Structure formats: C-alpha cells, structure tokens
Image: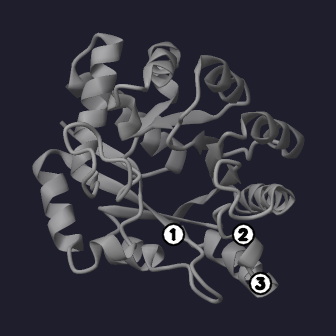
Amino acid sequence: MSLVDSHAHLDFEDFQGDVEGVVSRAAAVGVDRIVVVGLWRSPGSFGNALELARSRPGVFAATVGIHPHECAQVPEADWDESARLAADPSVVGVGETGLDYHYDLSPREVQQQSFRRSIRIAHGVGKPVVVHVREADTDCTAILREEGLPSAGGVIHCFTGDWPAARAYLDLGLHISVAGIVTFKTADAIRDAVRRIPRDRLLVETDSPFLAPVPFRGRRNEPAHVVHVASKVAELWGVTAGEVAEITTGNVKRLFRLA
C-alpha cells in the first residue's frame, strides 16, 4: 500500500529532532510522500517546510501560506515574500489560508482580506490553494466564488462540515481532505459526507501534530497514522484500504502535480 499524507506540519517544534524517525515510521506502513505545510511564523520567517522539500524531493513537498490565526500580524514585506516563495518549484500549493471563526484570533475582516490575497497569489503562480475553514463555510464559499478558484484547483483541508457544506465546495471545483476526526465518535456528519463525496475528489491527511485518529487520540499525531484515516474511509466506502490508498494517492498527485 502506498499513501500520501496530504497535510502535515513537520516543521513544528513537536517534531524537532524526530523528522528522521517520522519518515521511517511512515515508510514502514506505506506512507512514502508527505506534503509539509509551511506557514508564516514571525516577521521574515515561514518555517523550514521549503528546506525539507528541497532536501528530500521524493519524500517531501511543500506549501507556503499565511494562516487566518496569524494574518493580522503579517507585515507587508512578508506578503511579498509569500508570493515569491509560492513561485518556487519545490512549492506545490498556496496555504493553508482561509477563515477561522471558531477562535477569531484575527479580526474576521482581516481574515477575509488575507484569504482573498492568498487566492490571488495562487492564481498568479498557477498552483492550488489549501483552505482552512472552521465555522465559516458561508463566507468561505462566497469568497471562493467571487475570487474564482485557481485554475490548478484547491482543497478544503481537514474537512469538519456536513454534506451540504461538502457539496458546496465540490460544486466550486474543490477537493476535500479528511483527517483523524473522521474516526471520532462524534463525527457522524463528516462520515456521512465522506460516503457521498466523489471518489476522485477525496484526499486523506493527518494535520500532524494535531488530531490523532483513534486509537492514538490525545497523543502527538504523525504521518504514519494516516493509514487509520484511510482505513475508516475504506469502511465507509465498502472497499479495501488498499483501494482507498490507490484512489487518494492518485488524487493528491494530480492536485499537487507530484511526480
């Protein structure tokens, strides 16, 4: 079985000194590609996701973006840097960007402006947009509709909505990615959506180090655990985990143009 973890934060401090171990444990269960999400951290810094992608191009790919949590703090020079980094050949997507009305760590108007700006960067570099959305589906779909989905497409990462929300994103042309939440007891609405999502539009991810699936809930998440997400999807689809791996790996490779 060959799987791709389509969204992981391996440059977070949670993995400091353990990246080699993470890659080894992932490879041992068939996870041979990892999309590392590079986010703005502080003035002049987007972490080291790009450096990881350059160091192991056959294992890592990178995205670069500005998260809605931090967008109010970003200086203008770093918006210019974000656009420059997004054009790098090792970068396969723009984001994660989007809207988070659960925590509201940045004012909503600033989040919306940041989201629009990030979509425009994705348009400019011809790469897919990676979208974070929480309790903001109406505004998210409206902005995506107004700005237009980049020609390279995009993905709603770590989907937490229901089938009507999923259908609205699918109608816009987006892919949908599910993480460990799909294994949680309270995730009936997500599971219902997964049953209905067209198979050529679904990705799987961990969102490491967050949201470890059952049976690892409450511990640090890591890319090897994406096999448990795939297994739950297989159960919902009534197919084998190997079939889910083949389908979702093909989907993520097409979306992010991975060799």
Identity of the residue drawn at 44% across and 79% down: 48
Which SS class for mark 3? loop
State which quadrant residue 77 falls in.
bottom right
Do the residues bearing badges 1 and 3 touch, measured as CB atoms within 8 Å?
no
How many marks on residues? 3
Question: Which amino acid, mark 2?
Answer: Cys
Point out the tag, 1 or 3, that comes first from the N-terminus: 1
Residue closest to the eye, 90 or 22: 22
- How much space separates mark 2 and mark 3, taking CA atoms? 9 Å
Q: Nearer the viewer, residue 144 or 87?
A: 144
Residue at point 65% right, 88% down?
43
Label 2 packing within 10 angstroms: few (<14), some (14-19), many (20+): many
Q: Which residue is mark 1?
A: 38
Which amino acid does the dot numbered 3 rest on?
Pro
Classed neighbour count for the residue bearing mark 1: other residues with Cα under 10 Å, few (<14), some (14–19), many (≥20): many
Q: Quadrant of residue 64?
A: bottom right
Horizontal and vertical percent position of residue 31: 23, 48
Compared to 135, does 26 lie above or below? below
Residue to which mark 3 is pinned: 75
Q: Say if mark 2 contacts mark 3, CB within 8 Å.
A: no
Q: Mark 3, residues whose alpha carbon is within 10 Å: few (<14), some, or many (≥20)?
A: few
- Find disc 2 in the rendering and name its residue: 71
Label 2 sits on a secondary structure element that is helix
Name the spot of residue 217 as percent of width and height, x first. 27, 44
